[in-house]
């Protein structure tokens, strides 16, 4: 049966760009359409109107696979301090619809699971079928030790889809120091990764994440550049440990953070695939990018914390439409205290609603063909590539961190964020606008006690760099 087409536009003259611009000029009293343009933290222009003339050429990347029963991996964070509580969180998350878990280990600063041995990690993962539910780690400098523990727990499951998420460069950037030379940590992680690759053919070894830049107030281009430079550093290390170039890149995951600006998040994730494709092709490999998107911590507020639910939903939307392979949403109470069962359920169910009710996982690259998003993706990819080239010209990511190139770029972006908040170009619901009746936010709960876990040290002198300290936009506003 054919649905008839109703010609609603018949009888009306076709509107032209000139007609639209004339109406805009009249409405703006001659100010011109240029006055409606805005600029991103990277100085990239966002125009009010995009047409086919503005659309970028077909962008060189392979979109994330979509369709089937699930559009992406709903990844639940597990961070309860006590291993038994963490185990209940993990099993509840998987029973409640999560496809995988991210176990955040206490790195000495609190806010993670108190794990000090393989036996502790085994208690956290008791009842989790590693071959059915991927297990990812978040362990900072404890990464190589934690990877060994996870191997001890999962060694009876060679088909396990593990994500060891080794990422010493992010740990170095966040802490501002490394226990021993950072190059030694990267080399040791790669050596262990090469061994684990033989045992677990489906495992991912390294997480090349730019999240530390985002949380410190950095711009999207520098977040992408940091992730790209980390990917190159880790791929080089894996090749040095014996893997082929293609296998080295295939064992990496790119990590990015998404916030409450969904269109910007969509462009950032798509730009990540453009930059990745350019790098792997230059290295003679043909490996599609694998993206893990985590919700922004800097966007969450203590004041009127219920509005965080909207922020997290927007972040999840941007990650899904942008093509993330795995998405980790935080809890709406994260700025205040460790999440309770309700907050964890809301974080999980937000993704499930986006997937199963909004059907966001049914279309591969739904932003493709949008003149505005194609142009913004292309602009951001070019800006990120320029920043990546600057990092590589400085000697690679570790040298760029020590040389303060990245710290200076992040400081500039942070100042721009502060200026945008001060002149009200950026508004924060519950903080700068629409304040709740009770303007005194609840007192933040203290961090749980930390684990007495081993802190790995590499032989040699410590390296140091300016730390990329996390911020919260709410605090910048106050």
Image (cartoon, rainbow, N blue to C red):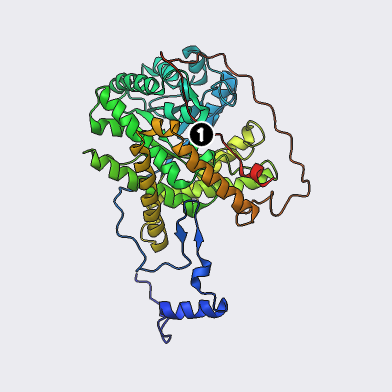
Closer-to-camera residue (64/275): 275
Whole-percent x, y for residue 172 in the image: 47, 27
Whole-percent x, y for residue 14 in the image: 40, 82
Instruction: Determine which quarter of the picture holds residue 250.
Output: top left
Whole-percent x, y for residue 136 in the image: 44, 28
Across the whole image, how many numbered discs are drawn on residues?
A: 1
Vertical comparison of 30 with 247: above or below = below
Closer-to-camera residue (261/466): 466
Closer-to-camera residue (197/4): 197
Vertical comparison of 262 with 455: above or below = below
Residue at horizontal 52 percent and vertical 76 percent from the top? 24
Residue at horizontal 52 percent and vertical 31 percent from the top? 467
Q: Residues within 10 Å of mark 1 (few under 14, many from 20)?
A: many
Residue 191 in sight? yes
Does residue 368 appear to the left or right of 346 in the view shown? Answer: left
Instruction: Determine which quarter of the picture holds residue 304.
Output: top right
Vertical comparison of 215 with 43: above or below = above
Vertical comparison of 156 with 468: above or below = above
What secondary structure is marked by label 1?
A: strand
Task: Quickly name the residue at label 1.
Answer: 76
> Which residue is outermost to the bottom?
11
Whole-percent x, y for residue 291 in the image: 39, 40
Q: Quadrant of the N terminus?
A: bottom left
> Which residue is outermost to the left?
284
Residue 167 in sight? no
Q: Quadrant of the C terminus?
A: top right
């Amino acid at each position: 049966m054919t649905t008839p087409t109703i010609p609603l536009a018949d009888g009306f003259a076709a509107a032209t760009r000139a007609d639209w611009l004339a109406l805009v000029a009249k409405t703006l009293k001659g100010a011109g359409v240029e006055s409606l343009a805005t600029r991103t933290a990277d100085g990239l222009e966002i125009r009010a109107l995009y047409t086919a003339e503005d659309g970028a050429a077909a962008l060189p990347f392979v979109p994330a696979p979509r369709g089937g029963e699930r559009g992406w991996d709903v990844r639940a964070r597990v961070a309860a301090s006590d291993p038994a509580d963490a185990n209940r969180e993990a099993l509840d998350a998987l029973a409640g619809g999560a496809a995988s878990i991210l176990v955040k280990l206490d790195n000495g600063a609190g806010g993670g699971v108190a794990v000090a041995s393989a036996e502790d990690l085994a208690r956290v993962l008791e009842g989790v079928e590693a071959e059915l539910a991927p297990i990812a780690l978040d362990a900072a400098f404890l990464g190589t030790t934690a990877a060994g523990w996870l191997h001890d727990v999962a060694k009876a499951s060679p088909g396990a889809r593990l994500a060891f998420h080794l990422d010493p460069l992010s740990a170095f950037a966040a802490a501002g120091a490394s226990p021993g030379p950072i190059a030694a940590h990267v080399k040791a992680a790669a050596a262990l990764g090469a061994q684990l690759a033989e045992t677990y053919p489906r495992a991912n070894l390294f997480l090349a994440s730019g999240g530390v830049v985002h949380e410190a107030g950095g711009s999207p281009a520098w977040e992408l550049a940091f992730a790209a430079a980390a990917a190159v550093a880790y791929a080089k290390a894996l090749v040095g440990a014996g893997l082929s170039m293609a296998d080295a890149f295939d064992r990496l995951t790119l990590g990015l953070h998404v916030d409450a600006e969904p269109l910007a998040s969509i462009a950032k994730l798509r730009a990540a695939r453009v930059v990745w494709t350019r790098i792997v092709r230059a290295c003679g490999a043909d490996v599609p990018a694998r993206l893990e998107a985590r919700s922004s911590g800097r966007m969450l507020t203590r004041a009127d914390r219920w509005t965080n639910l909207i922020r997290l939903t927007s972040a999840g939307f941007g990650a899904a439409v942008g093509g993330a392979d795995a998405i980790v949403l935080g809890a709406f109470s994260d700025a205040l205290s460790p999440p309770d069962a309700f907050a964890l359920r809301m974080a999980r169910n937000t993704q499930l609603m986006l997937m199963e009710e909004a059907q966001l996982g049914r279309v591969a690259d739904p932003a493709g063909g949008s003149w505005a998003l194609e142009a913004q993706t292309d602009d951001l990819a070019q800006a990120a590539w320029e920043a990546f080239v600057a990092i590589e010209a400085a000697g690679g990511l570790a040298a760029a961190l020590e040389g303060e190139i990245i710290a200076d770029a992040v400081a500039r972006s942070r100042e721009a964020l502060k200026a945008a908040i001060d002149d009200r170009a950026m508004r924060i619901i519950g903080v700068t606008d629409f304040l709740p009746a009770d303007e005194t936010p609840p007192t933040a709960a203290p961090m749980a006690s930390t684990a007495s876990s081993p802190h790995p040290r590499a032989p040699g002198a410590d390296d140091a760099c300016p730390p990329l300290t996390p911020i919260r936009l709410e605090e910048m506003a106050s």
